[in-house]
Image (cartoon, rainbow, N blue to C red):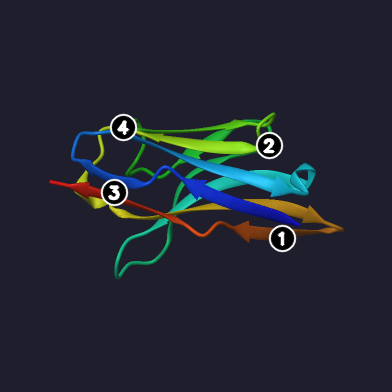
């Protein structure tokens, strides 16, 4: 099994930056793609950024050019560098990993970390 722990959230002013980390432990060899999601109050969870096992990245249109996802396989950690933050980026950010279990993929979620951007 894989466990994910996010960190790095906090309060920041608009225009500022934060870097979120997601550390994986357990059966990390089973991890394939990793994704950051976020959920703002009263809204559905949405994809923020995704990185494949080969390092290919995709981003939500709302964060393109401002956020950068990366992964350090040696540390079993995925990051998202968030620059030029806006109040609408305020949300709980969740890390998600797709793990291979037998012949299936099982998704694992972290507990989330709160990002608050003040105007």
Residue located at (33% from left, 67% from top): 43
Crowding at mark 1 (Cα within 10 Å: few <14, some 14-19, many 20+): some
Residue 109: x and y in percent read 58, 59
The first of marks 4 and 3 along the sequence is 4
Q: Nearer the viewer, residue 27 or 89?
A: 27
Residue located at (54% from left, 35% from top): 57
Crowding at mark 3 (Cα within 10 Å: few <14, some 14-19, many 20+): many
Res 103 → quadrant: bottom right
Q: Which mark is residue 83?
A: 4
Residue located at (34% from left, 40% from top): 63
Residue ID for mark 3: 89
Q: Nearer the viewer, residue 57 or 37?
A: 37
> Does residue 4 sit above or below 51 in this rendering?
below
> Does residue 25 sit above or below 52 in this rendering?
below
Q: Marks 1/2: CA distance?
A: 15 Å
Crowding at mark 4 (Cα within 10 Å: few <14, some 14-19, many 20+): some
Q: Marks 4/3: CA distance?
A: 10 Å
The first of marks 3 and 1 along the sequence is 3
């Amino acid at each position: 099994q894989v466990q994910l722990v996010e960190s790095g959230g906090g309060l920041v002013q608009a225009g500022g930056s934060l870097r979120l980390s997601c550390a994986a432990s357990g059966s990390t060899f089973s991890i394939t793609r990793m994704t950051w999601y976020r959920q703002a109050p009263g809204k559905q969870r949405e994809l923020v950024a995704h990185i494949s096992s080969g390092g290919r990245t995709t981003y939500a249109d709302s964060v393109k050019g401002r956020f950068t996802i990366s992964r350090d396989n040696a540390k079993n950690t995925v990051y998202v560098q968030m620059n030029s933050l806006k109040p609408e980026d305020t949300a709980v950010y969740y890390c998600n990993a797709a793990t291979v279990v037998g012949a299936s993929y099982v998704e694992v979620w972290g507990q989330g970390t709160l990002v608050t951007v003040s105007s």
